[in-house]
Amino acid sequence: MDKTLDERVTELIQSIKRYLITSIGKVESIASTEEFYLAFCFALRERIMINWAATNHTHDERGSRAIYYLCMEYLPGKFLSNNITNLGVTDLTEVVLNKMGRNLKEILDIEFDPGLGNGGLGRLASCFLDSLATQKYPSWAYGLRYQYGIFEQELYNGYQVERPDCWLLNQNPWEFRKDIHAKSVKFCGNLIPGANRHGDIVYDLENFEEVRALPYDTPIIGYPDENGEYTVSTLRLWSTKESPRNFALQRYNAGQLEQAGENTSLTDVLYPNDNHDLGKKIRLKQEFLLVCASIQDILHQHLRVHGDISSLPEKVQIQINDTHPTLVIVELIRRLIKDLDVSFKDAFEMTQQICNFTNHTIMKEAMEDWNELRLQSLLPRQHKIIQKLNQMFCDQIREKYPSDEEKVKRMSIISNGQIKMAYLAILGSKKINGVAFLHTEILKHQIFKDFFEMFPEKFLHITNGITQRRWLLECNPLLSNFIDRKIGSNKWVRDFHEIQKLSQIADDKESLDEFIKIKNENKKKLFHFIKQEAPIRDYKGRIIDHYPVFEDEEDVLVDVQVKRMHEYKRQFMNALHALMLYNEIKKDPSARKVKRHIVIGGKAAPGYDIAKKIILFIFIVARKINNDPEVSKHLKVVLIENYNVSKAEIIIPASDLSVQISTAGYEASGTGNMKLSINGSLTIGTEDGANIEMREAIGDEWWPFSFGSSTEEIKKLKLEKSYSPLNFYLQHPHIQRAVDMLKDASLVKNEHEHNDMLSLYNLLIASETPDKFFVIKDLLAYYETQKKVEELYVDKYKWAKFAIHNIAGMGRFSSDEVINNYARSIWNIEPCPL
């Protein structure tokens, strides 16, 4: 018999009080907020642990085929808020905290965002884990436990400064250290050749460097089904931080301080700056640490449950996310032929049945080529296997294309002293998928054209998606409740196709009024956040002010671009457009019909100088606009410092306009566009990535702000080398005025700023290959389309109607559907309920 709410309230209060005493040594009346947070997490965790153990036991008992998900980054956001949502205890939590005199926001604020990721790759992985657990698929995920994240971004007068992200400063109640499952990882050393029983050469090592990888497990909670049942998956993160053997004391005593702590600090930082040799070395060691520890764990689990290595392809699927974990292919083959006495031929065939590769980018610098000598030095045994695989593959190409040695050179995994990880991933995988239709077409017909011709059956597309539970149910409760009432149920939380029913109320004025009111409430929350927590710092990092906001949130167009800083994402174009608006207002303030608040946020990679200068430019533009009394009545700009999941959960529900303006053909998919759309933002965007499929799903009628050069146009301009940004610049005076402000010193306050802005001007107009990402080419179209935005926004009911139709058209972009597609088309796995 189900317990009443009162009984559940009493039970949870008693559990919190018990943990306060038994784990913290405090009675409730004198416990600090930090102590109460821990006890509350322990009380919720108690419920989770039972299902976690039951999930693992069920998978073992049934011998389920499972997916093992390898990724260098995850961006889960705060666990407490997500776990409250997925346990379905939001109402219970509010009653309990009210009775105990505690504030939920204060408790949630204690937890740091886990510093395990950087951008879209990490957040996508976390959405996938949520959906894997919710859909009850047998799954494990592996990553690294970064002690200091990627970095915490502070903006010193617009200049990005990287600080350690100390997200592990306090006790993390959601992780469990598992010393019993620690693994040994070997680097460097001298080869000792031998042979397995099949006559295949295998190698031992001597004089090697040994690193201990210590696992920390985090439960990933699925949303309950209609019977209240839920499964709990595992995210296992490897750390080298707390393993004494990783610290080289002899080197330390010899004064070699950097070398002494190198292996201890392997998991300190995500994506260390690789503009120097040490950074490249650490990155490669990180990647191998992940795959080596994980493959040992996977094989151990398989043998424990199934006992026989021959069934490995029937029971195990591995997903390689981007090229970072590609060495899992090599390490799996090596382990099979050496430790488990499988022939090389069989080991390679098994690996090809087990591994699958998702490509997440077409950017050449992100495809990962490793210097062969570096890899040979750090991983001599793995290098031997790569050499053998490459020789086999080149022979295979020659056999199929006997008179085409150029094709052999193009497709070779080892070329000009570099090892091409994407090529290795394709060779060693059963399936290769892109993350949007256009992206996959570019992979098939441009990036991996030769491979597609040789292995067409391997390639497919599965468009990315997001979890509606984090990005609507949790972060936008007002809109979630509205949807429940308007469509008559909350089935959309588990089946997002139900959201299409919302279109039925798009012409109902009362519903539109309610939607507008909800959007304004979310804007009020955002503006409060900006006033309190969006700092402006001086050159020494001291907070001297906070960004200004409009006094009244009603009728303010909130224009949002929040994502990783990169030239192809064209935050540069967004800031130039803001300058064009500035010049327009200075010329005729009375012409403005709409107040606009531009919100931009994102981090630049530590070694990415141009992206850092673009951040500075945005800061300078914001300073110019916000400090002009005449202009700031109509336009404001805020540059969000240290953008993360928690800040996204405040910004996204308040957004009216989603800015998705990447150069066509460069954005693989994008998921920020989806998060903004399901929260009622209209998209202004290029025909790129998932924008195309979103437009098709929502319908052209409700997708009015598409603009810019197409992928084919961009490709043609590159081939013909016919694009001249200078011509566009000279032909359009209002573009010229904005661009000239980069060089005429009207924006800057000192010589340093002036030099940086001048370098951006040269990047657009005066470099050898100017405007590589076609900012000037698309700026006029962006400017004109933004005029259409304001024309529509003036009619608040019409805008709300468009927004409702945009939400209603997003059903197919849930990560639940995406995971079902992976399960059917790639992994061939089935749900395994308790």
Image: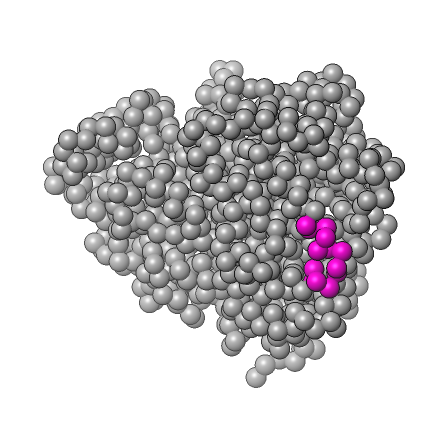
- Membership of 797 in magenta stretch: yes
Q: Where is residue 735 in the image (x, y as percent from the top left)?
A: 67, 31
Q: In which quarter of the image is the C terminus?
A: bottom left
Q: Residue 130, percent across and down?
A: 51, 58
Magenta stretch mostly in which secondary structure? helix
- 792 vs 259, left or right, is right
Q: In this view, does 163 lie above or below 426?
A: above
Point out residue 38 in the picture as x, y percentages from the top left corner: 66, 55
Residue 624 visible? The answer is yes
The residue segment tinted magenta is 788-800
Residue 15 drawn at (x, y percent): 65, 66
Residue at 45% x, 65% y: name it. 135
Say whether residue 15 is visible: no
Depth order, front residue of 50/145:
145
Residue under the point 53% across and 51% down: 691
Can you tell which quarter of the image residue 154 is in? Answer: top right
What is the quadrant of residue 598 in the picture? top right
Residue in front for this viewpoint, 819 or 224? 819
- The residue located at (30%, 46%) in the rendering is 429
Q: In this view, does 385 lie to the left or right of 659?
A: left
Residue 737 left/right relative to 1:
right
Residue depicted at x 50% and y 52%? 692
Residue at the far front: name it.
731
